[in-house]
Image (cartoon, rainbow, N blue to C red):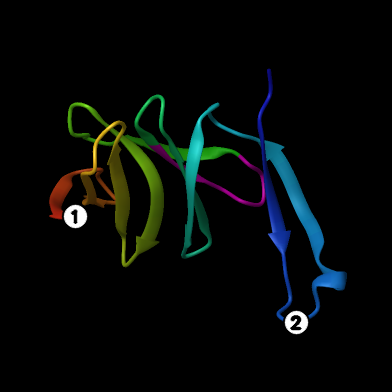
Amino acid sequence: MTYSIFLLLITLFTLQSATIEATFDSPASSINGLGWENGVLWALDTESTTAFSIDPSSGSVIDSLNIEYIPGYEPYGMAVRNDTLFICQLKYGGPDSYYCYHSAVTGTFLGMLDLC
């Protein structure tokens, strides 16, 4: 089975003119977060706990980072800012959730914040 990521270019207030600029195969099957910084698309895969940096012009994977995770939690949702990946860790069946900080350059775990 092939999964795809769609890049959608949207001009504010003119949704009728939105166009799909490119499509390419997803690097994994459980993408649950996307981020964008410095011309690089980031995709977070929950199943493999991997963040992929992707060249949006070709769809090729530039690098992949294994993201340290908390046992019993799954990475679900991501943002990128100033070379830092902000990844939400959710516990299924429980109320706790955390934001974990990782270096977008090395994947090194930088810290965490309890959201509950």
In percent of width and height, residue 10 lies at 72, 69
Q: Residue at x 53, y 62 (%)?
A: 39
Single out the mark in the foreground, 2 or 1. 1
Nearer to us in this view, 3 or 59: 3
Nearer to us in this view, 106 or 94: 94
Residue 37 lies within the magenta run? no
Query: What amino acid is labelled 1 in the image?
Result: Cys
- Circle 1 crowding by C-alpha within 10 Å: few under 14, some 14–19, many from 20: few
Q: Is residue 39 left or right of residue 97?
A: right
Name the disc covering residue 104, or none.
none
Q: CA distance from mark 2 to mark 1?
A: 35 Å
Describe the element under mark 1 as helix, strand or loop. Answer: loop
Residue 54 lies within the magenta run? yes
Residue found at the very far bottom of the displayed protein: 13
Q: Is residue 7 left or right of residue 54?
A: right
**Which residue is labeled 2 in the image?**
13
In percent of width and height, residue 59 lies at 63, 42
Query: What amino acid is labelled 2 in the image?
Result: Phe
* Vertical position of residue 96 compared to residue 15: above or below: above
Residue found at the very far left of the displayed protein: 111
Residue segment shown in magenta = 51-59
Q: Is residue 36 left or right of residue 101?
A: right
Q: Quadrant of the N terminus?
A: top right
